[in-house]
Amino acid sequence: MNAPVRIDLKDPSSFPSRRVEAWKYTDLYRWLRETPPASPEGAVEPGGPFAALGGEELTFVNGRCDGFAGIVAEGEGLTPVRLRFVSTAEGAGHQARVTIDVKPGASLTLLESYEGPARGYVSNISLDITVGEGARLTRVIVAEDAADAIGISQAHITLAHGATLHQSAFTAGGKLQRLETQVEHPGHGAFVRLDAAYALHDARHADLTSVVDHQGPDGRTSQLTKGVVHDTARGVFQGKIIVERGADGTDARMGHHALILSERGEIDAKPELIIYADDVQCAHGNTVGSLDQNALFYMQQRGIPFEEARALLTHAFLMEVVDRVEHEGAREVVREWLTARL
Amino acid sequence: MAAVQETIDAVAALEKYEHGFTSDIEQEFAPKGLNADIVRFISEKKCEPEWMLEWRLAAFERWQAMEEPTWASVKYEPIDYQDLYYYAAPKEKDGPKSLDEVDPELLAVYAKLGIPLKEQEVLAGVQGAPRVAVDAVFDSVSVVTTFKAELAKVGVIFMPISEALREHPELVRQYLGSVVPVSDNYFSALNSAVFSDGSFVYIPPGVRCPMELSTYFRINASQTGQFERTLIIADKGSYVSYLEGCTAPMRDENQLHAAVVEIIALDDAEVKYSTVQNWYPGDAEGKGGIYNFVTKRADCRGDRSKVSWTQVETGSAITWKYPSCLLKGEESSGEFYSIAITNGRQQADTGTKMVHLGKNSRSRIIAKAVSAGRSDSTYRGLVSVHPKATGVRNFTQCDSLLIGKECGSHTVPYIEARNGSAQLEHEATTTRLSEDQLFYAQQRGLSEEEAVALLVNGFVRDVLQELPMEFAVEAQKLVAISLEGSVG
């Protein structure tokens, strides 16, 4: 029941409906019942949201990247790798499977973007990532699918002892969008930071799902997700922290906080703790609400118009996640990117 | 007075044999298995009106078409529904009983527990004892209901539901199944088809029920399913506090308990429902014990109505129970206070649903779970806010305490917010008993078990405070007993 659903666009029976518990709020079957026509090849100019940061660029256009055989990081990666997934095919579907291997002791900064200038596409990306002993992966994701497109990204990350994962995802959603992260956490000095922020407008949908499975003792996990929905947008957060038998000394914290800034916005949240060890510190907090009326009133009283006051407060609310991004360049790119979508 | 004395004796006799041992009371059984004829048999036995039989048969048909749910995180052998008795009633006269048959270990437990329910004192006429009206449900039928006449003076109706079906059919017909529809879930459909008794309460407008009402459930006969149905209607501006206690004998096989409780609160009404569930949990190896699959739901129909659920769940092999509130009225409020203690190989999947449909409705959830031994405990809860429900407030707190290396504790809260003015807060923590605190308490001369009991009682105090006083004392002792053998 808990095994993640692997979606294969060629096999419609793999499209989960809301009857599948892990896809309860993201009903893929409702929007996609048959294999979509295959996307043609395409070409795009180099660029993407992280273009200014340089580094190596790897671009998947409609699920294809010529000559790509996976990313292998060795040694201290001083320059980032920009991994772009671009959809240029209208009304068609494509999928790709990417493997990333961060060797023991190495470090990699992965700047990942999901871009969709086209309309009505279905993009299905899966990533298999391994982070070796003492290695470090910084993964910063920016995702914005078209308002009528379906975008799915599923990452399966396996960490070795002493590995570090810093992941921060930022999304503006799509018609139906899901960013899923499954982490195998071995404990033993490994550390996971799993952050996300979403800012959704119109009828967009974003689903941030994560499972962190602590399999050995003394693992640490810190997770913070924040989101804002406008109009009839729908934000979904499903975070599961598992502490398996024997994973004593685990320290896992999870927070999800969301604002609904319209009458018909929707937030569905399900933070789960599944715990089989007793010597643990686990906690989660989950809040959903609107902006603090007192703060709004105070700012208006000081001469700040309502709209501006609201924007300022929302901005401050989401930037907490941005501030946790350690890569300075990426942090500023994301700050600008997110601000433009508020 | 003879009749009263008889009633007192009858309940006193029941009480004496409570908990882990069987009463050798001659039983009248319906044949094993479940089919439409059994449903007819039960209905006939109860002299029910024709519409009730039809209602049951419709429920039975629905149930046959349904599948047993599997989503709860509990594991158990499949239940053979054809291998159960669906109706068992004690015969008029009690058979011979012998205390010698009782396991001395169990007797010791009762001695520690004290008198489990204060009613016994009441019935025995002890001066100064609290006044509680009791409805005792033994296997499938309600055996005695006390204080009926006195309650009737203020207009409160408190009687077995089978009797209410005869005496107040219009009330039962109007409300039965209006909160938990027949096809709500697998077990509620089963209950609707075969329920044989339970309690019925009606509090007229503006009446504050002068005493606590209480139902005491006991499964006695072996291989019997118990399906009771409780219906509580609090009319405008009324108040009632209702208590429920459960026990069952020790048996090797698992017994099924699938009850349905429906509460209706009209404008300004308030209902406080407290449960101390102490069904037999099975032995240390997980053999035997009660499957407690219960549907409890309150419908806060009226504006400013309030329903408060308080539960202390210490028994049952498997608990699967989500007392919920449909907050339809404006400014209605729902509360859920829960202590779930699991030990041995017990499994509990329990929580609540707060469905906010009315404007400015509020809810509060405090759930405390303590897992020990090889048990598993899950809090599963839903807070949902309808698009039209503005100004909703919810606060949820779930704390879990783990004692030992082989138990599990899980938290699965759902929040579904569809209104921008809602303020929902949820927090959950999972920890183990602090070694420093244990050490300190032991240093002061407490044994390890006493220290654990003390700390756990502190952990669950927020919820214990919500119980009516007589129950709180009992529950506190129960907490300590349930955890025996969990340390060291």
Image (cartoon, coloured by chain):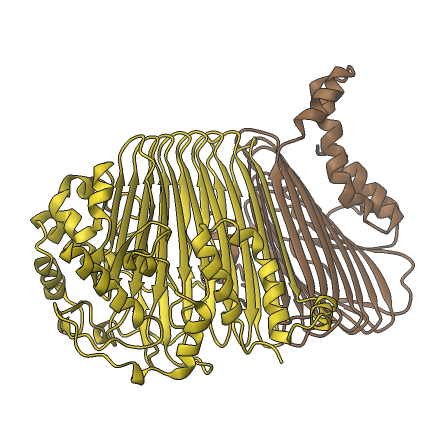
A334 vs B153, nearest the viewer: B153
Place of residue B26 in the rendered image (x, y in percent of width and height, measured from the top left): 15, 75
Q: In which quarter of the image is residue B68?
A: bottom left
Q: Is residue B349 left or right of residue A70?
A: left
Q: In which quarter of the image is residue B244?
A: bottom left
Look at the picture and state if B171 lies above or below A195: above
Place of residue B275 in the rendered image (x, y in percent of width and height, measured from the top left): 40, 56
User: Quick check: can you spot residue B186?
Assistant: no
Q: What residue is at 80 percent from the left and 37 percent from the top?
A: A336
A225 vs A180, nearest the viewer: A225
Look at the picture and state if B443 lies above or below A335: below
Q: Quadrant of residue B298?
A: top left
Q: What residue is at 41 percent from the left and 48 percent from the top?
A: B324
Q: Chain A is drawn in which colour?
A: brown
Q: Is residue B168 left or right of residue B245?
A: left
Q: What residue is at 91 percent from the left and 65 percent from the top?
A: A76
User: Quick check: can you spot residue B120?
Assistant: yes
Quarter holding the C terminus of chain B? bottom right
B239 vs B450, nearest the viewer: B450
- Among the chains, which one is yellow? B
**Residue farthest to the front?**
B127
Place of residue A315 in the rendered image (x, y in percent of width and height, measured from the top left): 75, 33
